[in-house]
Image (cartoon, rainbow, N blue to C red):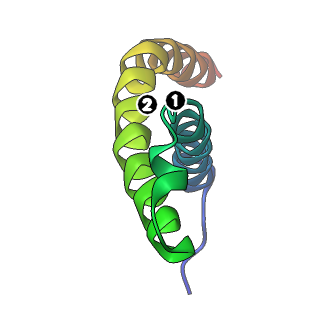
């Protein structure tokens, strides 16, 4: 049985955050009603899901470049702080 550590939980939370941002952006970018003009409900859902996944990957890359150095700085300083003890 695998034990989920803090890093794994943070990775899942980051992925869910990117999905939520992508889902919201997919709805906000639907200026012309492309998502609503699809004939079936499932077609609209699949189209929005596809747009969400593409946008989530974009958010993941962007936030990784923005938040990565900050988290690296915090983690390295906390590890260095533990080494002093």
Q: Quadrant of residue 14?
A: top right
Residue marked by disc 2: 59
Residue for point 60% across, 58% down: 5
Q: Secondary structure at mark 1?
A: loop
The image position of residue 16, as x and y in percent, is 59, 50
Q: Quadrant of residue 12?
A: bottom right
The number of callouts visible is 2
The quarter of the picture where the N terminus appears is bottom right
First along the sequence among labels 1 and 2: 1
Q: Residues within 10 Å of mark 2 (few under 14, many from 20)?
A: some
Residue for point 62% across, 25% down: 82
Name the mark on residue 44: none
Horizontal relation, residue 5 to residue 33: left or right: right
Residue for point 65% across, 22% down: 85
- Closer to the camera in the image, 84 or 22: 22
Residue marked by disc 1: 31
The image position of residue 27, as x and y in percent, is 58, 40
Horizontal relation, residue 20 to residue 8: left or right: right
Whole-angstrom CA distance, mark 1 to mark 2, is 20 Å
Circle 1 or circle 2, nearest the eye: 1
Q: Residues within 10 Å of mark 1 (few under 14, many from 20)?
A: few
């Amino acid at each position: 049985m695998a034990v989920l550590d803090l890093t794994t939980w943070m990775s899942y939370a980051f992925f869910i955050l990117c999905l939520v941002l992508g889902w919201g952006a997919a709805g906000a970018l639907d200026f012309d009603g492309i998502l609503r003009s699809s004939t079936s409900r499932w077609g609209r859902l699949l189209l929005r899901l596809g747009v969400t996944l593409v946008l989530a990957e974009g958010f993941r890359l962007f936030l990784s470049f923005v938040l990565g150095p900050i988290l690296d700085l915090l983690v390295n300083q906390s590890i260095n702080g533990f080494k002093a003890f």
